[in-house]
Amino acid sequence: MRALEHLLNGGRSCALNLANSRGYSVNEVIAMAETVCSRSIRSETVGRRPGDPPILIGDAHSAHSVLGWEPIRSDLEAQIRNAWDWMRQRN
């Protein structure tokens, strides 16, 4: 809604990262998803692909300054639980 209001009020179109500025490893995400979903997730550990950055963390400073946006689900468990609940409601 904030992005739409921004555009309707004459703001310029731009790309904004909606992130919480906290990075998680793939293993942390898998472990939390297994906990939240009460299911085992098959995974395979392999080397990083060419071009993959060693660390990638989203920064939402622009979204905050342009839209006044702040994350409300900033911890990993809340993010996964919200996505899991959404998926279960649709299946």
Image: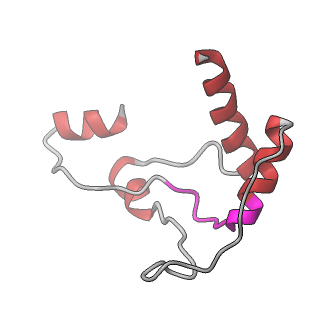
| Percent x, y of residue 13 | 18, 50
Q: Which residues are magenta?
A: 19-28
The residue lying at 53 percent from left, 49 percent from top is: 70
> What main secondary structure does the magenta stretch of the protein show?
loop
Image height check: is 83 above or below 75? above
Could you say which quadrant of the image residue 1 lies in?
Answer: top left
Tell me if 62 is positioned left or right of 34 in this view: left
| Percent x, y of residue 17 | 41, 57
Could you say which quadrant of the image residue 26 lies in?
Answer: bottom right
| Percent x, y of residue 4 | 27, 34
Is residue 46 highlighted in magenta?
Answer: no
| Percent x, y of residue 12 | 15, 51
The residue lying at 58 percent from left, 57 percent from top is: 20
Nearer to the camera, 44 or 23: 44
The residue lying at 61 percent from left, 17 percent from top is: 91
Colour basis: secondary structure
